[in-house]
Every structure is written in structure tokens, then in C-alpha cells.
Image (spheres, helix red, strand yellow):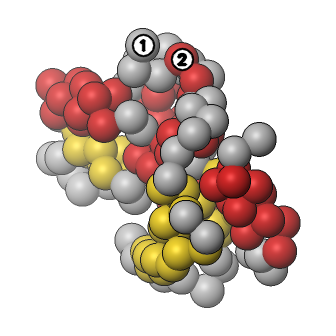
């Protein structure tokens, strides 16, 4: 197990919040020096997030905190990869929607369409769900 995966798992385990590893580690890339972790913070307001950056050993950690309502959108965004995110945003735009780290929105009404789970967002886009390790391939 890589040092950064160990650090990520330790951060998740020790957090008082519900957190999950995202980014390249979630996609199965074992040797990454940057770590993305998404945490649910019930005290965060909707459409608000916080980033905490720190280093431990040789690992650079980005800890994203968000309202529970936006957890799925945050996981989708910060798991990536970038090419997959761009493709999903283009698909959303073609369907009259906007996708960002807070959710999938109807461009015309501004109404939130989906945000709580990755599957919910992908279903609304009529896009097949893939396990993180198969995204971007």
C-alpha cells in the first residue's frame, strides 16, 4: 500500500465527519502524491464548500467539506478524472443543464435536478454509472 493511501485512510478513519477518499486513489491509482478526500459537514450551508489543504510526509492532501445534499456531486467531481468531468458537463449542457461540484441544475429554472449521489446525477444525464477505476478509460 502506498504511503499516501495510508495517510488518506488514516485521515478518513480519524475524522469526526463522514469522509470518503476521492481522486486518483479512488480510481485505483495506487501511487499518487496528492490525495482528495470529500467529507459531509451538516453545518455547511447549501452551495457552500470548504477546502482544507495540508501536507503529511510526502503527500499533499485536499480535504473538501460540503453539505450532505451535495455529497454525490462532490464525489463525482473530485474523483474525476478531468476528461470524464468535462464530458459530463458537455452532456449536461446539451440537455439544458449545468453540472458542477454542487449538483446537476436545470439551466432554465435554476432548479436542482440531482446532487446527493453519483448514480442519481448520472441517471438524470442518462449516462451509465461506472466504477471509479473504470472512469476515463
Looking at the rendered structure, the secondary structure element under dot 2 is helix
* Along the viewing direction, whichever of 33 and 35 lies nearer the viewer: 33
Quarter of image, res 93: top left
Q: Is residue 116 above or below residue 7?
A: above
Residue on which the image places disc 1? 137
Report the residue at 57% width, 39% height from top. Answer: 31
Q: Is residue 88 visible?
A: no
**Structural crowding at the residue carrying mark 2, measured as other residues with C-alpha within 10 Å and reported as few (<14), some (14–19) or many (≥20):** few
Q: Position of residue 88 (x, y in %)?
A: 30, 29
Q: Is residue 45 above or below residue 103?
A: below
* Along the viewing direction, whichever of 133 and 60 lies nearer the viewer: 60
- Quadrant where the image shows the C terminus: top left
Q: Position of residue 3 (x, y in %)?
A: 69, 53
Q: Is residue 22 visible?
A: yes
- Quadrant where the image shows the N terminus: top right
Residue 134 image label: 2
Q: Are marks 1 and 2 in contact (CB under 8 Å)?
A: yes
Q: CA distance from mark 1 to mark 2?
A: 6 Å
Q: Position of residue 39 (x, y in %)?
A: 63, 67
* Along the viewing direction, whichever of 105 and 130 lies nearer the viewer: 130
**Structural crowding at the residue carrying mark 1, measured as other residues with C-alpha within 10 Å and reported as few (<14), some (14–19) or many (≥20):** few
Report the residue at 23% width, 33% height from top. Answer: 86
Q: Position of residue 4 (x, y in %)?
A: 64, 55
Amino acid at each position: 500500500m502506498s504511503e499516501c493511501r495510508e495517510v488518506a485512510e488514516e485521515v478518513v478513519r480519524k475524522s469526526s465527519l463522514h469522509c470518503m477518499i476521492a481522486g486518483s486513489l479512488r480510481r485505483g491509482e495506487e501511487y499518487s502524491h496528492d490525495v482528495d478526500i470529500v467529507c459531509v459537514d451538516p453545518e455547511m450551508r447549501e452551495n457552500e464548500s470548504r477546502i482544507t489543504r495540508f501536507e503529511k510526509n510526502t503527500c499533499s492532501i485536499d480535504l473538501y467539506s460540503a453539505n450532505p445534499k451535495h455529497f454525490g456531486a462532490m464525489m463525482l467531481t473530485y474523483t474525476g478524472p478531468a476528461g470524464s468531468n468535462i464530458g459530463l458537463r458537455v452532456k449536461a449542457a446539451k440537455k439544458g443543464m449545468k453540472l458542477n461540484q454542487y449538483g446537476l441544475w436545470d439551466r432554465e429554472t435554476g432548479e436542482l435536478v440531482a446532487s446527493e449521489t453519483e448514480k442519481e446525477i448520472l441517471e438524470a444525464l442518462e449516462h451509465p454509472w461506472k466504477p471509479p477505476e473504470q472512469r476515463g478509460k
